[in-house]
Amino acid sequence: MKKIRKDNKGFTLVELIVVIVILAILAAILVPALLGYIDKAKQQQIVLNAKSALTAAQAEMSSLYAKSADPDQIDKSKASGAYANDVLTTADVPNCTALIVGCASADKTKHAAYTITYVAYTEGGKTIYYDGKSWDTVVPTVPAATYTIK
């Protein structure tokens, strides 16, 4: 008598459902963690853009200091805006919606009047502040002289 050989190739419906359920559970666990990493990366990008704006603003203020020029020229409302445009071009922060920088002193004869000690940087509805030491979302004390860049 011949044995009938049955070649069962493929998966049963139950096996497929079990695999799909396992994948769904893994996705439910991993997606929130992944979204958290994406949010942290976006926040870090905003901080990097703000640091770039701070560096550009300080470079322009240093240039004004070297020329013995009035630091009020950096404010768009008091000048042609050339310095403000230089800051934004140098910083290369196209998503910046507001940028305010400040100096510790309003006395234009002192070095402190040209040293940036305060930054309020806004991008995408989020504002972060620099208080001369670190970046945070808490508003620090606004210094004596502030200049609106954008």
Image: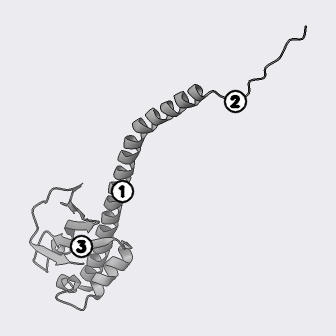
The kind of residue tagged 2 is: Gly
**Could you say where residue 69 lies in the image, as x and y percent from the top left?**
22, 86
Q: Secondary structure at mark 3?
A: strand
Please name the residue that numbered disc 2 is placed on: 10
Which of disc 3 and disc 2 is earlier in sequence?
2
Q: Badge 2, how many Cα within 10 Å: few under 14, some, many 20+?
A: few
Please name the residue that numbered disc 3 is placed on: 98
Q: Badge 1, how many Cα within 10 Å: few under 14, some, many 20+?
A: few
Q: Secondary structure at mark 2?
A: loop
The residue lying at 63 percent from left, 27 percent from top is 12
Which quadrant is the N terminus positioned in? Answer: top right
Query: For the residues marked 1 and 3, what is the alpha-carbon distance in whole angstroms?
Result: 18 Å
Along the viewing direction, whichever of 147 and 32 lies nearer the viewer? 32
> Image height check: is 96 above or below 136?
below
The kind of residue tagged 1 is: Lys
**Could you say where residue 80 lies in the image, as x and y percent from the top left?**
24, 92
